[in-house]
Image (cartoon, rainbow, N blue to C red):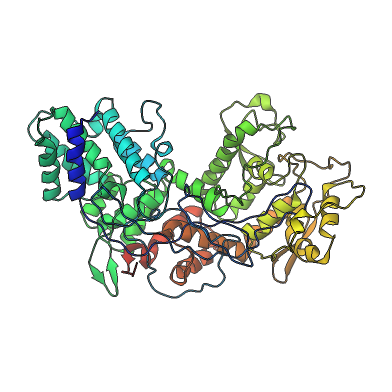
């Protein structure tokens, strides 16, 4: 381990590594959904509590009517104590942000301008994982070899927490030791540590990548002199390990500062180094690669065309962009955000022999693979709802009507019947999450479609509605039970009959875990027809799950939700009038033939706000 005298020296070094200042912070991600209650009415998020836990780095907001967007949080401020910084941070550039139920804040309209955003974002834990992997080859920290993110303090907004800073130091110290005593040593220092100029050259080379910019001569001198002039002197390897540790706890590493002061009009123009960092943390969740660094060194990231060329190159790198694609679609768009109001993964079906609750991570991984497959096969927004691709294992084959003996525990890409399995909402992960333990839930499934996918606001439930019992009777299908439940009083009818229930009825061909069924467990035939309200005055008679998905994909509000959630996710900002101009542009393109998911990812870099920032009052 690094000896105490070097830790003291590193503390002094960090304090001198650079000061950071900040502007205002964006709010975090919000979410709301249907409240679950077996045997009683389940309502979509109608002003109910929503928000992110500290681990998601977000903060909550609600809107009384629910369904169409939540008020953004004001965000927090804070600095990084002990690291010499005076900079504030909140979340991270490229961190997820969404607008809550329905995904769209209908009160925003396009106003040209640059929205205020944080000047000094902090790396998210998932980004920390990717950065130390790409820089140092580290995927686990000894002795248990857990990913660093599992050891770090949960993502948070606001000022640096003392426990978070302590853990940054502990994890950084262990990583430095693991690297210098293991097979990845050359990723930091490839020369003999006792050779002349070895440490200096290594600090310059590594610092260029770790800080996402060239180190100044003063910084290099400070690193070398501070760490080399301790009493008693350390060995060359000890000094090198202390230097690596100093990088890992430096504000220039943990934060992603934007300190350029070059003015363009009424805004400040980011340097090419800062643009490179924005690109890499947005698209890859990590540091720039050599090609992007070379473009920054040549100052070739100043025009929209230059930025677009790099963005298009980067989005095509599936192994790096794929995790971001999956996270945006599953977490920000499909609302698998871990909040109390999300129904993802909270239901078990242990009485069903085809289902295994221990395999929820496998079901989740299938969704991630599905979203990546759509994106990297040139798929469009519509394909998210219509693609029949599934990733099948021996454990899920029977649920999809396939022979388990033909599959292994390794997911196999399969194209299922497009009429029965169109899009992500016909996969095991969604259908089993939005159901009751032993029966379907048209209300949960319908509320998800109504609120999150097509942005229809059904209004708040009447007080006590969620406790309404199912009326006594003989029912031959679950649909009959739910219809009787919704007809118990007029206030329930006004919400459930025209809005919430119909899309759920169209999904009744899938049982509680997602297996195709034509006969209800109660004995009656499945009726998957429904009159679905896709927008005010737009009611369509749907006769199959495939038609439902096709109609959702063609609904303008569904595209608006998708575009706005992507812009919020990419910028880390709650919906606002300035960003709405970019949302409108992407929304228009989503209806154009040939416009792919990857095109959308790249287009967010073409907004003026991607290369400019404004100074704002904290």
Q: Residue furthest front?
A: 162
Q: Residue 375 location, x and y as percent?
A: 51, 49
Q: Left of 45 or right of it: where is 612? A: left
Q: Would you say residue 205 is visible in this rendering?
A: yes
Quadrant of the rendering where the C terminus is positioned:
bottom left
Q: Residue at x 57, y 48 (%)?
A: 336
Q: Is residue 545 left or right of residue 80?
A: right
Q: Position of residue 614 (x, y in %)?
A: 32, 69
Residue appearing at x 30%, y 32% in the figure: 174
Image spot of residue 616 (x, y percent): 33, 69
Q: Residue furthest left?
A: 196
Point out residue 580 in the picture as x, y percentages from the top left corner: 48, 69
Residue 166 vs residue 565, the one in the foreground? 166
Is 538 displayed left or right of 89 in the figure? right
Residue for point 71% across, 31% down: 354
- Seen as rendered, the residue at the extreme right is 474
Of the 4 image quadrants, the one containing the N terminus is top left
Above/below status of 183 relative to 502: above
Quarter of the image for residue 465 reads bottom right
Q: Is residue 392 visible?
A: no
Counting the numbered discs, the total is 0
């Amino acid at each position: 381990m690094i000896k105490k005298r070097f830790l003291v020296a590193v503390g002094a070094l960090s304090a001198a590594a650079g000061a950071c200042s900040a502007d205002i912070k964006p709010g975090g991600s919000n979410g709301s959904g249907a409240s679950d209650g077996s045997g009683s009415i389940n309502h979509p998020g109608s002003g109910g509590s929503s928000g992110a836990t500290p681990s998601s780095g977000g903060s909550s907001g609600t809107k009384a009517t629910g369904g169409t967007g939540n008020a953004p949080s004001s965000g927090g401020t804070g600095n990084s104590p002990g690291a010499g910084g005076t900079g504030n941070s909140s979340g991270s550039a490229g961190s997820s942000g969404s607008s809550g139920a329905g995904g769209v804040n209908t009160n925003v309209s396009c106003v040209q301008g640059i929205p205020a955003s944080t000047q000094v974002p902090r790396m998210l834990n998932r980004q920390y994982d990717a950065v130390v992997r790409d820089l140092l080859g580290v995927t686990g920290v000894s002795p248990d070899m857990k990913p660093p993110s599992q050891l770090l303090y949960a993502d948070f907004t606001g000022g640096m927490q003392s426990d978070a800073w302590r853990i940054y130091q502990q994890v950084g110290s262990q990583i430095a030791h693991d690297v210098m005593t293991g097979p990845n040593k050359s990723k930091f220092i490839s020369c003999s540590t006792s050779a002349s100029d070895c440490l200096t050259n290594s600090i310059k080379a590594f610092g260029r990548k770790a800080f996402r910019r060239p180190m100044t001569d003063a910084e290099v001198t400070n690193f070398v002199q501070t760490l080399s002039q301790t009493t008693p002197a350390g060995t060359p390897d000890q000094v090198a390990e202390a230097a690596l540790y100093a990088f890992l706890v430096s504000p220039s590493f943990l934060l992603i500062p934007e300190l350029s002061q070059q003015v363009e009009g009424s805004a400040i123009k980011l340097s090419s180094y800062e643009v490179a960092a924005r690109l890499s943390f947005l698209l890859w969740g990590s540091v720039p690669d050599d090609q992007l660094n070379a473009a920054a060194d040549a100052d070739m990231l100043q025009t929209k065309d230059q930025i677009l060329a790099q963005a298009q190159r980067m989005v095509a790198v599936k192994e790096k962009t794929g995790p971001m694609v999956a996270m945006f679609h599953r977490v920000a768009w499909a609302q698998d955000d871990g909040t109390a109001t999300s129904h993802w993964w909270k239901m078990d079906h242990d009485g069903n022999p085809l289902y295994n609750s221990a395999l929820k991570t496998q079901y989740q991984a299938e969704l991630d693979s599905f979203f990546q497959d759509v994106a990297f096969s040139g798929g469009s927004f519509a394909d998210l709802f219509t693609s029949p691709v599934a990733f099948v294992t021996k454990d899920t084959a029977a649920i999809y009507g396939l022979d388990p003996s033909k599959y292994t525990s390794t997911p196999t890409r399969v194209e299922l019947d497009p009429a029965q399995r169109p899009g992500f909402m016909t996969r095991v992960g969604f259908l089993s999450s939005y159901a009751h333990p032993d029966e379907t839930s048209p209300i949960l499934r319908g509320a998800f479609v109504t609120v999150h996918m097509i942005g229809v606001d059904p209004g708040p439930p009447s007080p006590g509605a969620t406790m309404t019992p199912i009326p006594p009777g003989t029912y031959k299908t679950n649909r009959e039970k739910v219809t009787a439940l919704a007809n118990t009083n007029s206030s329930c009818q006004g919400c459930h009959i025209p809005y919430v229930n119909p899309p759920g009825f169209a999904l009744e061909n899938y049982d509680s875990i997602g297996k195709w069924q034509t006969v209800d467990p109660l004995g009656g035939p499945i009726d998957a027809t429904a009159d679905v309200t896709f927008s005010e005055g737009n009611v369509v008679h749907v006769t199959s799950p495939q038609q439902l998905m096709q109609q959702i994909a063609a609904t303008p509000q569904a595209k608006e939700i998708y575009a706005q959630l992507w812009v919020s996710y990419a910028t880390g900002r709650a919906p606002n009038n300035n960003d709405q101009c970019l949302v409108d542009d992407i929304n228009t393109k989503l209806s154009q033939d040939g416009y792919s998911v990857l095109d959308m990812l790249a287009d967010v870099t073409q907004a003026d706000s991607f290369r400019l920032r404004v100074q704002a009052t904290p």
